[in-house]
């Protein structure tokens, strides 16, 4: 089996996270954590085993430990430190986008679940940082006539949702939320990205610092195309939520096609109108 291509420089990612831990930016993790807790409150299920949370070590993991007392916090390594069938709740917390093999990560999580256990992942969606990605690409094209990987590519909701089925999870659901964040100073945006440990850790990235001319041109384009009436830069942060259950015999199963015993019109309390048969086309005659 061919290994997946290397997306992430894990050494650089670890270095970025260690630096970020000195002055972390936690607001996005706080928001996602609150959202997941609210979703779990709506699940008609009592979780008896300690939760498993996969995520960044340090302040980010500490926040999840406080939100889920007794939870086991595990770093998002390529091979996860998991025990098969040990948990009925596994949370992949805002780090799946750095995985070289996201499908493999979800499969490992499924194996750690008990039957009818719940897997829920939160990760940045494809619209995240779309403004920054666009202006960097345009600026680099204008100045150098070429593009280089400067912002991590992120998946869209359809591709992310397909991973749940491929991993063998039942009742898969994928949805998203989006926030619009305003920055008066572009340097504050970069500071927040660094404080999240989300600096450029792409394996194919340029190792040299970004040229000042490129940064200035990108920020000029940003102010022209993606600013509000007060001149503040608009930043989109999209979060995908992926939910699936470990298969179990007690779960609901879809009915076989054609097994319905009630007409849809009866359920809706309306009258069923049959379709008119299609008219037959008249034969064409050649002109005399």
Image (spheres, helix red, strand yellow):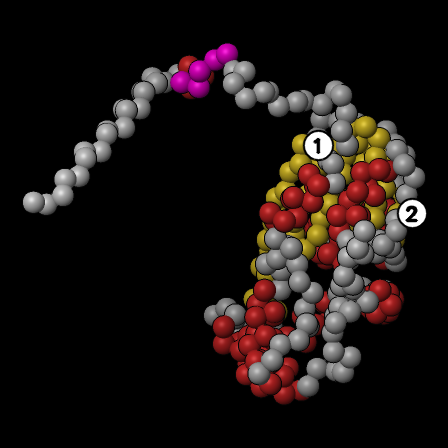
Label pair 2/1, CB-CB below 8 angstroms: no
- State yes or no: residue 263 in magenta: yes
Q: Which residue sits at x=88%, y=49%?
A: 80
Closer to the camera, 203 or 98?
203
Number of the label disc, if any, that sits on residue 170: 1
Q: Which residue sits at x=48%, y=13%?
A: 262
Residue linked to disc 2: 81
Residue 155, relative to residue 168: is it above or below?
Answer: below
- In the rendered image, which quarter is residue 49 located in? top right
| Mark closest to the chain's N terminus, 2 or 1 | 2
Categorize mark 1 by other alpha carbons within 10 Å: few (<14), some (14-19), many (20+): some
Horizontal and vertical percent position of residue 8: 78, 64
Horizontal and vertical percent position of residue 2: 79, 55
Categorize mark 2 by other alpha carbons within 10 Å: few (<14), some (14-19), many (20+): few
Q: Which residue sits at x=57%, y=70%?
A: 134
Closer to the camera, 31 or 54?
54
Horizontal and vertical percent position of residue 90: 81, 40
Number of the label disc, if any, that sits on residue 215: none
Residue lying furthest left: 288
- From which residue to which does the magenta span run? 261-265
User: What separation in Å lies between label 2 and label 1 (alpha carbons)?
Assistant: 23 Å
| Callout 1 secondary element | strand
């Amino acid at each position: 089996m061919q290994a997946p291509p290397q997306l992430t420089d894990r050494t650089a990612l670890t270095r970025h996270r260690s630096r970020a831990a000195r002055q972390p930016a936690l607001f996005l993790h706080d928001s996602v954590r609150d959202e997941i807790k609210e979703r779990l409150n709506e699940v008609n299920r009592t979780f008896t085993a300690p939760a498993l949370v996969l995520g960044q070590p340090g302040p980010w993991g500490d926040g999840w430990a406080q939100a889920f007392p007794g939870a086991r916090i595990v770093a998002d390594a390529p091979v996860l430190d998991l025990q098969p069938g040990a948990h009925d709740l596994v949370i992949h917390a805002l780090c799946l986008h750095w995985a070289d093999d996201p499908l493999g990560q979800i499969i490992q999580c499924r194996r750690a679940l008990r039957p009818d256990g719940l897997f829920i992942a939160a990760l940045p969606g494809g619209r995240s940082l779309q403004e920054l990605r666009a202006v960097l690409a345009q600026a680099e094209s204008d100045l150098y006539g070429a593009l280089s990987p400067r912002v991590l590519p992120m998946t869209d909701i359809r591709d992310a949702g397909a991973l749940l089925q491929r991993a063998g999870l039942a009742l898969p659901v994928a949805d998203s939320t989006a926030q619009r964040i305003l920055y008066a100073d572009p340097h504050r945006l970069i500071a927040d990205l660094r404080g999240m440990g989300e600096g450029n850790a792409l394996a194919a990235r340029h190792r040299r610092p970004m040229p000042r001319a490129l940064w200035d041109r990108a920020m000029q384009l940003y102010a022209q195309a993606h600013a509000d009436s007060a001149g503040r830069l608009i930043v989109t942060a999209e979060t995908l939520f992926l939910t699936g259950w470990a298969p179990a015999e007690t779960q609901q199963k879809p009915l076989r096609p054609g097994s319905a015993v009630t007409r849809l019109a009866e359920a809706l309390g309306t009258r069923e109108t049959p379709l008119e048969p299609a008219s037959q086309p008249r034969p064409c005659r050649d002109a005399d």
